[in-house]
């Protein structure tokens, strides 16, 4: 007597769709986190720095951060904005 495997009941289409959407959402979230981490290490261009000088606090903070030819990254600019309340 040959033993054949018993047929498995397939997942419902609704459950398959839900799993697909969940996997897609996870992939998108991972991509967004990776892009955000990449952005933090990029240097801010001078035009955007000029637009960020919305208050005296920001202007002074940007000038202090640029001493010695240091270029400000987006992560540093975000910290300056948090500190100055912009």
Image (tube, rainbow, N blue to C red):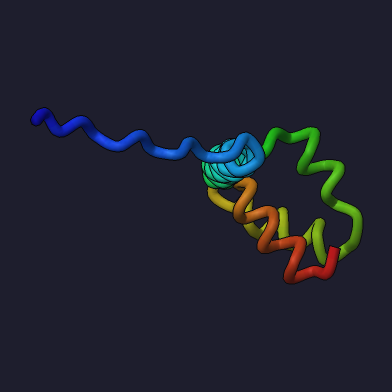
Direction from residue 82 to residue 37 in the image, left or right: left
Residue 33 appears at what percent x and percent y? 56, 46
Residue 38 appears at what percent x and percent y? 53, 40
Quadrant assignment for the C terminus? bottom right
- For the residue pair 72 and 28, the one nearer the viewer reads as 28
Q: Is residue 74 visible?
A: yes
Q: Is residue 60 above or below residue 34?
A: below
Rendered image quadrant of residue 60:
bottom right
Residue 84 appears at what percent x and percent y? 80, 69
In the image as oriented, which residue stretches furthest toward the left?
1
- For the residue pair 59 and 15, the one nearer the viewer reads as 15
Quadrant assignment for the N terminus? top left
In the image as oriented, which residue stretches furthest toward the front?
1
* Residue drawn 80% across the image and 33% down it: 47
* Residue drawn 62% across the image and 55% down it: 76
Q: Is residue 69 visible?
A: no
Q: Is residue 76 above or below residue 45?
A: below
* Residue drawn 38% across the image and 38% down it: 8
Rendered image quadrant of residue 57:
bottom right
Residue 82 appears at what percent x and percent y? 74, 67
Direction from residue 28 to residue 55 in the image, left or right: right
* Residue drawn 83% across the image and 69% down it: 85
Q: Is residue 68 above or below residue 61?
A: above
- For the residue pair 31 and 36, the one nearer the viewer reads as 31
Direction from residue 46 to residue 66 in the image, left or right: left
């Amino acid at each position: 007597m040959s033993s054949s495997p018993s047929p498995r009941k397939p997942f419902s289409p609704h459950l398959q769709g839900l799993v697909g959407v969940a996997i897609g959402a996870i992939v998108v979230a991972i991509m967004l986190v990776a892009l955000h981490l990449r952005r933090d290490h990029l240097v801010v261009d001078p035009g955007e720095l000029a637009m960020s000088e919305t208050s005296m606090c920001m202007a002074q903070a940007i000038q202090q951060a640029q001493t010695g030819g240091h270029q400000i990254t987006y992560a540093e600019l975000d910290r300056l904005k948090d500190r100055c309340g912009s």
